[in-house]
Amino acid sequence: MAQVTLRKVVKKYDEVLAVRGIDLDISDKEFIVLVGPSGCGKSTTLRMIAGLEEISGGDIAIGGHVVNDVPPKDRDIAMVFQNYALYPHMNVYENMSFGLKLKKTPKDVIDHKVGHAAGILGLAPYLERYPRQLSGGQRQRVAMGRAIVRDPQVFLFDEPLSNLDAKLRVQMRSEIRELHQRLKTTTVYVTHDQIEAMTMADKIVVMREGRISQVGAPLDLYDRPANLFVAGFIGSPAMNLIEGEIGPGQVFKAETFDLALPTGAGRQGQPSLELGRKVTLGFRPEHLQLAQTGIPAEVVVVEPTGSETHVLARTGKREIVAVFRERHGFKPGDKVMLAPDPAVIHLFDTQSALRIDLPQ
Ligand code: ADP
């Protein structure tokens, strides 16, 4: 069993509180992604699990054993870095076998393990090549191969795809995912890219300023963000967030429009939607439609991507984004009326930033 548990984990670098008390349960065989903006503490958290950073407080357990004082080499983990960290003077075979050699693994076992990993990763034809003779994607595969041959309890990935071009990133994303389906090794993966998180994770951990903002399955976070930060962070283009207040008769009132909230909103033990309460309405760009009534807006920028068109429009002092799959032929300056689908709107308390559940 290789579950990983973090209890009240803290990291302080002199004055900087990089990680402010994290509790996290990672199940055996789970693929978990730590995601968040730069500086939120993702890498520090991963490096503490790896043992590359000492923890300033709390406990980390791997496979049920507290490893706070266990050196990295004895934690039975394998880490894959953004810069691959390959040895330039060693060929692919030597790079992949180096760790096993250090552990005095017999040559035939090494050959078998390297051959097996090279087969999985499509590296068999390249075993004699040196890193400089490989493409970025192949180098990344060698780095993964080096992790695989160690047959660790846990894989740790630190932004492993950041150095690759967009197309290769998409390809490697599915390769890593496929690898996990095959090996089922518990994996902790760090990225700042929410699309990578959405597409790869069994469970996403959204971090912000050294804390966990929300943990959940990708679509749970997408469908029910717990707060304004996750609402704005998960999803691309980002969710539209418009500040307003509650008007008479359960209506959301903003600068340029009113929107009736589903009846029963704010009941069932929820904080009441009392008149005048400051709330923020959230609606995703793909949940906007052209309508007779709704949000009056003026088209500012039209971005066709081929499969869909992103329309940036201004309503009052705010800009909102709509995504259309159909081709409307909008031009800047066009006046449009956009209506959010009421079944999938989100509401947040503006002051606390917390989600207010609406009846479905
Ligand atoms: P992320 O991976 O989310 O971008 P990091 O975990 O690298 O964030 O960093 C979290 C915070 O800790 C940042 O404010 C960063 O500046 C700080 N930090 C990271 N490493 C060090 C270090 N070695 N010394 C001092 N501060 C650090």
Image: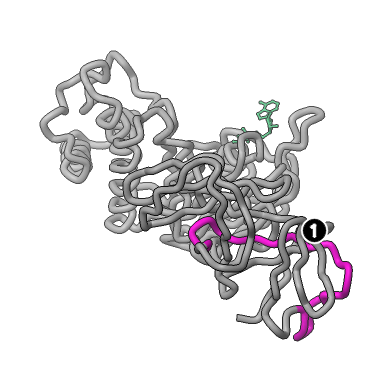
Question: x, y percentage for residue 208?
Answer: 68, 46
Q: Is residue 270 magenta?
A: yes
Q: Is residue 219 magenta?
A: no
Q: Which residue is mark 1?
A: 350
Q: Report the colour scheme.
A: one colour
Q: Quarter-wise, where is residue 10 in the image? A: top right
Tell me if residue 273 can be seen: yes
* Quadrant housing the N terminus: bottom left
Left or right placement of residue 314 versus residue 166 in this view: right
Question: x, y percentage for residue 84?
Answer: 38, 28
Is 197 situated above or below 98? below
Left or right placement of residue 65 versus residue 261 in this view: left
Q: Which residues are magenta?
A: 266-288
Q: Residue at x 63, y 57 (%)?
A: 296
Left or right placement of residue 181 versus residue 292 in this view: left
Between residue 360 and residue 192, name the one nearer to us: 360
